Amino acid sequence: MSPKYTKRPLPIRLFNAIGPNPALQVNKLMAKAQQKTSLFDYGDAWFLEPLSVLVQSINEEAKLSPLGTAIMQKRLVDALATRLRAETLFKRHPEILEIDLGHVFCIAGLQRTGTTLLHRLLASDPRTRAPLSWEVLNPAPLPGDTRNKARIRQAKIAERGLKYIAPNFFAIHPIEWDMPEEDVLFLDVSFMSQSAEATMRVPTYAAWLEAQDNTPAYDYMKKLMQLLHWQSPAKNTVLKSPHHMEYLDIILKVFPNASIIQTHRDPQKTMASFVSMVCHGVGIFSNEVNTLEISSHWQRKVQRLLHLSHEVRAKNPDGFVDVAYADLVVDPLAELRRVYAHAGVKCNNETIAHAEALLTRQVQNKYGRHVYDAADFGMSRDQLDGDFADYRQQFNIQPEAQT
């Protein structure tokens, strides 16, 4: 345990000391979502099983603080409300589900390997659609919010709230209201996502999820992406999440014209950084952060991601393009051009101009430096070298200078 992951402002500490901490209940979550939206039709109820497994795992294993319970309750209610609003729109406007998402760029690299930078570069192209932070919170329009002011206001409040609760988190992974965000949050709407195990201790749910067919969740994610295109059309689409490495076979089934972009970086630089990020995330929801348990879980998980993605690559070698972190940092525009060329999508002068503008905003360490110690997570250089020897060799990953 380490107190640095649970250090919070005094009002938050007081709330966690005396605030209510009830168990989550599926029926009450659904009732709150119905009350919030005045809607009652969830469509196909297949999502109830993953929601029930997740809620039970949270109640029995996550050890949420009162603040963590309050946040998680809101997130689950908001996800259910999104389903209610989306289902209503799908029924009123069946043409939404006929929308062509164009070429799909799917960034599916390991955590901390440059995926955010590449995501933002691709999304800076006006021809390409990525969900923005304010859209992943509310992908369906809110009643009367014709100019999206309420959705944007909610996202700004959420950003300020996270900065207040856990200011150090922004040094690790900034979540800015108007920037592209991981579409894995659309999988949250189906309650089949790695987000839960990246923010809470839910081993039963995580094991259950690995054993399921995740196709229905990806089908619904596609519907939500079509809903975004319906509101603001674009020619192409970009997806991004390490989560996708587990389900690339499903990605290629649901998005058959997708090109898979895998980013690569020295695991000596990425593993401890990522586990540190998870520990900070878990510390938002719980006062108990077991760094060694989290490290063990994610070291196994990362090996699973590599193994499953390798299996899909072997069957679809032409569908993948690799981007080395070192190359992306040194010459991001050259790597962007290479990704476009592999996808067969023209990279024009306007594309480059927008990417250059994005790079002026993309300032490293904008919110401070991410400081961590691999020893906190039981990691050693020799162990990481051994665990990732095959991965290094396959993609010719060069060691980075240690700082």
Image (tube, grey):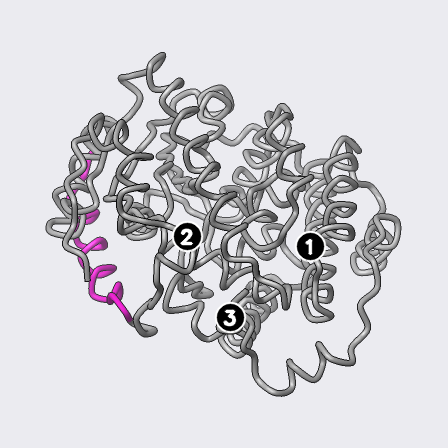
The mark closer to the camera, 1 or 3, is: 1
Please name the predominant secondary structure of the magenta segment in the image. helix
Quarter assignment of residue 147: bottom right
Residue shown at 44% from the left, 41% from the top: 299
Q: Position of residue 10 (x, y in %)?
A: 61, 87
Q: Which one is earlier in the sequence, the residue at label 1 or at label 3?
A: 1
Q: Quadrant of the C terminus?
A: bottom left
**Residue to which mark 3 is pinned:** 159
Distance Cα–Cα, label 2 vs label 3? 32 Å
Q: Position of residue 239 (x, y in %)?
A: 42, 40
Label placed on residue 378: 2
Q: Is residue 184 left or right of residue 51?
A: left
In the picture of the structure, the residue carrying the numbered disc 1 is 62
Residue 255 x %, y %: 46, 25
Q: What amino acid type should be assigned to the residue bearing mark 1?
A: Ala
Q: Is residue 126 above or below residue 276?
A: above
In terms of depth relative to the viewer, which is nearer, 361 or 350? Answer: 361
User: Quick one: label 2 or label 1, which is nearer the N terminus?
Assistant: 1
> Identity of the amino acid at label 2?
Gly
Nearer the camera: disc 2 or disc 1: 2
Was residue 353 drawn as part of the magenta stretch in this picture?
yes
Q: Which residues are magenta?
A: 346-365
